[in-house]
Image: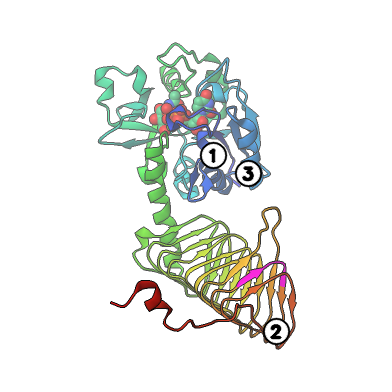
């Protein structure tokens, strides 16, 4: 890989998020911000270090489960708060070190390439914003960076600078070794700012180049407003990727697809759908306003207005409106209307009538419902689990099947006998 180390700063509190959860663990498209940036960093370098402090156990647990090869370093955020303080305990393996703020979930490996092919002592990402508020302002003179001033420390004139620090820097390792120990916290936030390295290096005559980047990849997330704006960009990317792979989407901007969802073959996703987790959708149609969570859908049509909850496997099956499926396997089944199918296994040729409920929970434990092939389940059936319905069974509408095995080929019916009381209506209401 490249002769470069990457350091991701993820130790901050993120107080502007106004959340008990660490900022870098807030989700974009179903994964923590820090997951996205770590994933892209590992495409660029195999020496990736993440600096942690605030909620460090949660951050380490969340990230190391997907990326076991990442190194974690703990910041002494009490004595050395700030992005410069975060760098104090870091030792990079390579001569060039890319430092990334951990609140930049939109960064891509491609966008990091621009930092790698230059001989400047420091390369620093900047963009121009009409409204630069919140960002550090970058003073550029004769095409070179002179210094960065944080918003809270900036003078009136400096606040008008529209070049902002995007939050990614390439340093020669010796520059960090030299200047990080010299940082001071004499500023508005009493923090050790990594950005102060720039001025010290400039004063020593080093070459600091700005790299103009786009907000689309380098946007920082400090608040829930930024989080929502970044989600829009990430969703666009995810949808465009799948449409390019052949998925048809109706009104794509109304569809939410998480990172980790996979489509195969030709699929159609109608408007207002949400597909999450590690779902696989293959040769299927997900109709309007349906939700598919962490499930497999193959050769099937789902919805409109259906809810496929986690751990379901649906194959060659028709799921209609107002059907909820949870942790169930359906193969070659029709469940057209208004049903709850939970902890169930349902086999080929079986028809589930409207209003069928698997009563899977007794208030303490969950139980399974197993339904064989070619079963006809009449409308408004309750299946009180655990229950096994063998092949070729007919269940009459309105039946409650209680814990039992219903033998192959039988009819099961549980209804009170119907009776007519002739003339009752008129006796009760009188004649009109
Ligand atoms: C920082 C930059 C600012 C830039 C902006 C871009 C500094 C001083 N300012 O400001 O110039 O325009 O990013 O988005 O660097 N962190 C730690 N330890 C800490 C504090 C922060 O690891 O003690 C981490 C945070 O977890 C975060 C990153 O550093 O991932 C940036 O911190 P944040 O507080 O968001 O800095 P900004 O105010 O956005
Ligand atoms: Mg920030």
The structure residue drawn at horizontal position 61% and vertical position 27%, both measured from the top left corner, is: 90
Q: Nearer the viewer, mark 3 or mark 2?
A: 2
The one nearer the camera, 249 or 104, is 249
**Corner quadrant of residue 329:** bottom right
For disc 1, the marked residue is 25
Q: Nearer the viewer, mark 1 or mark 2?
A: 2
For disc 2, the marked residue is 391
Judge whether residue 178 can be spotted in this image.
Answer: yes
Question: Is tag 3's residue or tag 2's residue first in the polypeptide sequence?
Answer: 3
Q: CA distance from mark 3 to mark 2?
A: 55 Å
- Measured as percent of width and height from the top left, residue 370 is found at 69, 73
Judge whether residue 121 can be spotted in this image.
Answer: no
Residue 23 falls within the magenta-colored stretch = no
The residues colored magenta run: 382-387
Classify 10 Å Cα crowding around label 1: few (below 14), some (14-19), many (20 and above): many
Q: Is residue 172 left or right of residue 214?
A: right
What element does badge 3 sit on? loop
The relative height of residue 104 versus residue 173 in the rendered view (above or below) is below
Q: Contact (CB < 8 A) between labels 1 and 2?
A: no
The structure residue drawn at horizontal position 56% and vertical position 62%, both measured from the top left corner, is: 279
For disc 3, the marked residue is 46
The relative height of residue 170 versus residue 419 in the rendered view (above or below) is above
The one nearer the camera, 171 or 165, is 165
Mark 2 near ligand 1 (CB under 8 Å)?
no
**Corner quadrant of residue 123:** top left
């Amino acid at each position: 890989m490249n002769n470069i180390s990457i350091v991701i700063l993820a130790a901050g509190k993120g107080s502007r998020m106004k959340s008990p959860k660490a900022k870098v663990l807030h989700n974009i498209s179903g994964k923590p911000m820090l997951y996205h940036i770590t994933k892209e960093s590992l495409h660029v370098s195999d020496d990736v270090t993440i600096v942690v402090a605030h909620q460090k156990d949660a951050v380490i647990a969340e990230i190391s489960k997907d990326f076991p090869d990442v190194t974690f370093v703990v910041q002494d955020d009490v004595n050395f708060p700030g992005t410069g303080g975060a760098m104090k305990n870091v030792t990079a393996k390579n001569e060039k070190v890319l430092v990334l703020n951990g609140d930049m979930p939109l960064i891509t490996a491609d966008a990091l390439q621009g930092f790698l092919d230059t001989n400047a002592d420091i390369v620093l990402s900047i963009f121009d914003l009409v409204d630069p508020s919140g960002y550090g302002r970058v003073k550029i003179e004769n095409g070179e960076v002179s210094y960065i001033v944080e918003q809270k420390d900036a003078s009136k004139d400096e606040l008008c600078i529209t070049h902002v620090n995007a939050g990614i820097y390439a340093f020669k390792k010796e520059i960090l070794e030299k200047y990080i120990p010299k940082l001071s916290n004499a500023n508005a936030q009493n923090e050790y700012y990594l950005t102060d390295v720039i001025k010290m290096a400039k004063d020593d005559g080093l070459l600091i180049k700005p790299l103009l980047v786009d907000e689309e990849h380098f946007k920082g997330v400090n608040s829930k407003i930024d989080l929502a704006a970044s989600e829009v960009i990430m969703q666009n990317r995810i949808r465009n990727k799948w449409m390019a792979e052949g998925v048809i989407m109706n009104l794509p901007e109304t569809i939410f697809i998480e990172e980790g969802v996979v489509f195969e073959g030709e699929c159609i996703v109608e408007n207002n759908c949400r597909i999450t987790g590690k779902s696989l959708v293959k040769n299927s149609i997900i109709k309007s306003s349906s939700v598919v969570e962490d499930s497999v859908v193959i050769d099937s049509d789902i919805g409109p207005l259906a809810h496929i909850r986690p751990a379901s496997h649906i194959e060659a099956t028709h799921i209609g409106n107002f059907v909820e499926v949870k942790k169930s396997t359906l193969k070659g089944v029709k469940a057209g209307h208004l049903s709850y199918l939970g902890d169930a296994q349902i086999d080929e040729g079986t028809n589930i009538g409207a209003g069928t409920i698997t009563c899977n929970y007794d208030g303490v434990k969950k139980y399974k419902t197993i339904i064989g092939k070619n079963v006809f389940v009449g409308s408004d059936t309750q299946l009180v689990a655990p229950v096994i319905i063998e092949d070729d069974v007919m269940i009459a509408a309105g039946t409650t099947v209680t814990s039992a095995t219903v033998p192959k080929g039988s009819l099961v019916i549980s209804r009170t006998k119907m009776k007519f009381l002739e003339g009752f209506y008129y006796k009760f209401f009188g004649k009109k």
